[in-house]
């Protein structure tokens, strides 16, 4: 066992710190039938290897104090509870897991979790048969390094989106699934994703994002207030009703004018009556004028139909210039 662990341990000791400013917490390290001396050693080795990798590791005393002050119960590792842990401790990642013993055999499980989403970034499971305390300590250190490498690999194949809103607290929907309230962060698979933000008293904002592997994108949407008591869809309905009324009115007038003009044009030069048919219709000029007016009315009708279609199918959006308070996109940044 020792021979197998030594090469990995050497890699841990020479690891290059990559997250010098990132804070993590060893949140819930549980031990089952493990002697107190081994518990302390395992906890210390795990913290030491994380610090060597460049993480700022909160002390157990600080974690306990902050969670107690915030009213978070012990063992809080999933769902909204984990979000509260991240907020109180000001950390984005936590390590959970533990060691269980059966005689001189030990089972080790460690998991790296994102606090803002509960996403497991990496997990390491090991079994050590007939092991000494020193071997278990080394196994914990190696597992900590593997968690770090697993998290790095995870971020290279996923995208991170941070959603902010003005006003804050907008309800966020990602790909049709409620995701929470802004500000929030989510890890997503690469590809196209639909983001929608809604807030009482404000018009909704919808956008489509194209995210690549390892990309980090920040979106800040400004939601436009609506008049008190106004239905969010009402302005669009009034607009489409106006376009539709103008379209059909222009269409009717155009058909009537063009038809009348064509009739007068056809009658030009034909007999207007009399025994010798000396009176002929002279209707070319008014016929041409009516046909031209009818054509203009039909063109207006077509334009109104196009505007009506766009008003009914285009979602309300807010255009925000880069550099202003609004959309900020950072592309190609490894997290």
Image: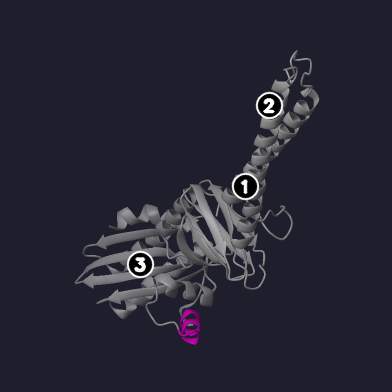
Is the residue marked by circle 3 packed among few (<14), some (14-19), or many (20+) residues within 10 Å?
many
- Residue that carries the numbered disc 2 in the rendered image: 263
**Residue 254 visible in the picture:** yes
Badge nearest the viewer, 3 or 1 = 1
Numbered disc 2: secondary structure: helix
- Residue 236: percent from the left, percent from the top? 62, 57
- Residue 17: percent from the left, percent from the top? 54, 58
Q: Is residue 207 left or right of residue 321?
A: left
The residue positioned farthest toward the front in the image shown: 275
Secondary structure character of the magenta stretch overall: helix
Coloring scheme of the render? one colour
Tell me if residue 152 is in the magenta stretch: no
Would you say the residues marked 3 and 1 are in contact, meaning their CB atoms lie under 8 Å apart? no
Q: Quadrant of the C terminus?
A: bottom right
Is the residue marked by circle 2 packed among few (<14), some (14-19), or many (20+) residues within 10 Å?
some
The residue positioned farthest toward the left in the image shown: 103
Q: Residue at x 67, y 47 (%)?
A: 246
Numbered disc 1: secondary structure: helix
Is the residue marked by circle 1 packed among few (<14), some (14-19), or many (20+) residues within 10 Å?
many
Q: Is residue 34 left or right of residue 313?
A: left
User: Rounded to the nearest whole Å, what is the CA distance between mark 3 and mark 1?
Assistant: 71 Å
Q: Which mark is residue 308?
A: 1
Write down the region rendered in magenta. 62-71
């Amino acid at each position: 066992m020792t021979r197998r662990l030594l090469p990995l341990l050497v890699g841990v000791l020479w690891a290059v710190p990559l997250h010098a400013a990132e804070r993590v917490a060893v949140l819930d390290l549980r031990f089952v039938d493990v002697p107190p001396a081994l518990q302390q050693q395992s906890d210390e080795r795990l913290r030491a290897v994380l610090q060597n990798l460049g993480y700022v590791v909160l002390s157990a005393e600080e974690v306990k104090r902050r969670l107690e002050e915030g009213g978070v119960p012990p063992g809080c590792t999933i769902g909204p509870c984990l979000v509260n842990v991240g907020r109180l401790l000001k950390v984005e990642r936590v390590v959970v897991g533990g060691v269980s013993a059966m005689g001189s055999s030990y089972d080790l499980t460690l998991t790296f979790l994102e606090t803002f989403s509960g996403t497991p970034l990496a997990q390491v499971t090991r079994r050590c048969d007939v092991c000494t305390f020193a071997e278990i300590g080394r196994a914990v250190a190696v597992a900590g390094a593997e968690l770090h490498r697993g998290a790095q690999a995870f971020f290279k194949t996923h995208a991170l989106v941070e959603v902010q809103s003005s006003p804050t607290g907008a309800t966020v929907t990602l790909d049709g699934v409620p995701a929470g309230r802004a500000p929030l962060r989510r890890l997503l698979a690469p590809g196209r994703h639909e983001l929608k933000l809604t807030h009482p008293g404000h018009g909704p904002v919808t956008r489509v994002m194209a995210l690549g592997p390892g990309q980090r994108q920040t979106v800040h949407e400004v939601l436009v207030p609506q008049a008190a008591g106004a239905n969010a869809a009402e302005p669009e309905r009034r607009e489409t009703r106006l376009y539709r009324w103008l379209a059909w009115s222009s269409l009717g007038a155009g058909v009537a004018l063009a038809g009348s003009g064509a009739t007068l044009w056809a009658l030009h030069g034909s007999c207007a009556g009399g025994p010798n048919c000396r009176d002929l219709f002279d209707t070319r000029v008014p016929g041409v004028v009516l046909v031209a007016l009818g054509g203009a009315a039909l063109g207006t009708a077509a334009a109104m139909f196009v505007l009506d279609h766009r008003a009914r199918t285009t979602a309300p959006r807010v255009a925000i210039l880069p550099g202003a308070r609004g959309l900020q996109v950072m592309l190609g940044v490894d997290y």
